[in-house]
Amino acid sequence: MLFGLLCLTFAISHLVPGDPARLAAGPDASEAMVQTVRARYGLDRPLGVQFVRYLQGLAAGDLGESLRSRNTVRADLARYFPNTFELVTLALLLAVVVGIPLGMLSAVYKDTWIDHWSRVVSVSGVALPAFWLGLMLQLLIALHLGWLPLGGRLGITATPPEPITHLLLVDALLRGQWSTFADAVRHAVLPVVTLCFPALASIMLVNRAEMLETLQQDYIKTARAQGFSSFRVVTRYALRNAMIPTLSMIGLRYGWMLGGTILVETVFDWPGIGLYAVNAAVSSDFQPIMGVTLLVGLNFMLANVVVDLAYGWLDPRIRRPSAT
Amino acid sequence: MSARVLSLPGQEASARRRSELRRYARLFARSAASLTGLAIVLLFLVVTLIGPWIVPYPGDARGAVHLDRKLQAPSAAHWFGTDEVGNDIYTRVILGARVSLQIGLIITLVAALIGVPLGIVAGYVGGTVGELIMRVTDVFLSVPALLLALAVVGALGPGIVNAMIALSLVWWPGYVRLIQAKTLALKQETYVEAARAVGTGRLRIVFIHILPNCVSPIMVKASMDMGTAILAAASLGFIGLGAQPPHPEWGAMISHGRNYLPTWWWYSAFPGLAIYFTVLGFNLLGDGLRDLLDPKSRGMT
């Protein structure tokens, strides 16, 4: 799987019509200079040799260097990834914390106004262009009402904390820099809300559908008949069983968020890997895009492992396949 | 009753099919959401068809310059206002529907044309080839489509054609997954086994038994994909890697209008609404189709 991903990134960066050496040498470079660059990066070797060298480099943690920032891609990613990680994690948390109860309420109060409104919200959430939603939130809340900052990670006056975990919010807390923390939170609200909206919508929809099905099962009726309170039946018995499909949607949405963060970071000028990839793509700077693709792919694979583990935790039958 | 007894078998079959269709139509009409979706999609199609004849300033689609009326607020003369060179935004939004329809159709079609045959091969033939196809599919699915498309467009260079190529290239794996699963299930059906037992050729089985049964899931997915593909193309346009100005593409228009926020809000606002309603329409239609064609999910969404 990982090997396949490596092949894919390599193929995209090498089998396209653009000539990376010419790009690296600049538009005014002479043929001789292009040749020098080509030799320096080994671009004149056969593809097979290039691929092996690419793998060797990766094994040593070398992702190439960015032509634009002149840094190694690894250093750039190390700098930008924590910001993206924070954004995506917060958005996912918000989506789960709001989406699951909303789906639950919607299922329990099916065909009432609660259900109708949460469905309107969720159907809109999937269809709204994230970048446009971001712009409109900026327009309304940041520019018109002036409640929150327009974009960026921190205000100019705030001092960033000394890095411990490289996660700005966590670091600010650990260092006890309350004003910095508050500023960082204010900057995070709009991007997080924008990014979470489509995920919230689909988590809610899946959870609602699953809850509706689960609530019709016999064991739920039995539990109700035995006089368990409605709240207990819904949260303890039904929700747990409805969680498995919801969980796979959460895993899937994590991946989509890593894609959607490209747009949200562009709108809010959030210094993460999405914005980094966009800037690289606009200036035909390959290595960073490949680095980001690889990193995101790895993250997604990890997320799938976590989801699989969580299945086992939720459903003992999966944990002990022999018992069924 | 007597008429039915006298009718020829062919007529009877077609009558049955008609009543079947009527039943479907009734089921579909029961759902307000599906009907809304259908209405939006129909409106979208009508707009793409007659667009050039209903817009007030047809010349503005290709980037005419009227600096005397630049950045005007929405008014009777310019329903959605004007942009920085005085083009009527209403005109450009209406004509942008054509661009979006074209993008959506091409991406969905190419993705289905690549994905469906691969899915059938992976599901029906299986073996090493099938395994290989599924591995490659998994790799593609492990990276968000938008990021992958960004990488491909970064390599090919910006432009609407390249954006379409990139999105088509990353869009097919979903179809492989869908069709492979469906084919695997169909393969176990008695009638397919029977066909195989009497010596029917593989190709014939695929075309007579497998493909027709894949039509409804493909239709549902294609309807949903029209929306998501339009959204993805607009996203690339917004980043600046898709359609280039003065092409009337919604994403690119929003991206330009962004520089004129907050004072000239209408520049970004209306193209965004157009994307929203279009995607919403295709999603609702897809949902409705799924409820219709897959009775198990009926009433669940």
Image (spheres, coloured by chain):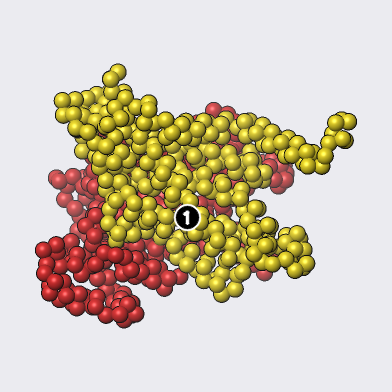
Label 1 Cα neighbours within 10 Å, binned few <14 / some 14-19 / many ≥20: many
User: What's under tag 1, amino acid-wise?
Assistant: Ala
Which chain is painted in yellow? Answer: B
Residue A234 seen by the camera: no
Compared with B271, B174 (above or below) is: below
Question: Residue A129 location, x and y as percent?
Answer: 38, 41
The chain letter for the residue carrying disc 1 is: B
Q: Colour of chain A?
A: red
Horizontal side of residue B221 vs B298, given as left or right: left
The N terminus of chain B, quarter of image: top right
| Disc 1 secondary structure class | helix
Q: Quadrant of the C terminus of chain B?
A: top right
Name the residue located 69 percent from the left edge and 45 percent from the top edge. A217
Closer to us: A153 or B69: B69
Q: Is residue B183 above or below residue B43?
A: below
Q: Is residue B137 left or right of residue A261?
A: right
Residue sitting at x 37%, y 41%:
B99
Q: Nearer the viewer, residue B209 or A24?
A: B209
Front-most of B275 and A144?
Answer: B275
Residue carrying label 1:
B111
Residue A42 is left or right of residue B93, and the answer is: left
User: Residue visible at 27% across and 73% down?
Assistant: A62
Picture residue at 37% right of the left edge, 61% below the top: A296
Q: Relative to residue B18, is residue B149 depicted above or below?
A: below
**Horizontal and vertical percent position of residue A242:** 59, 49
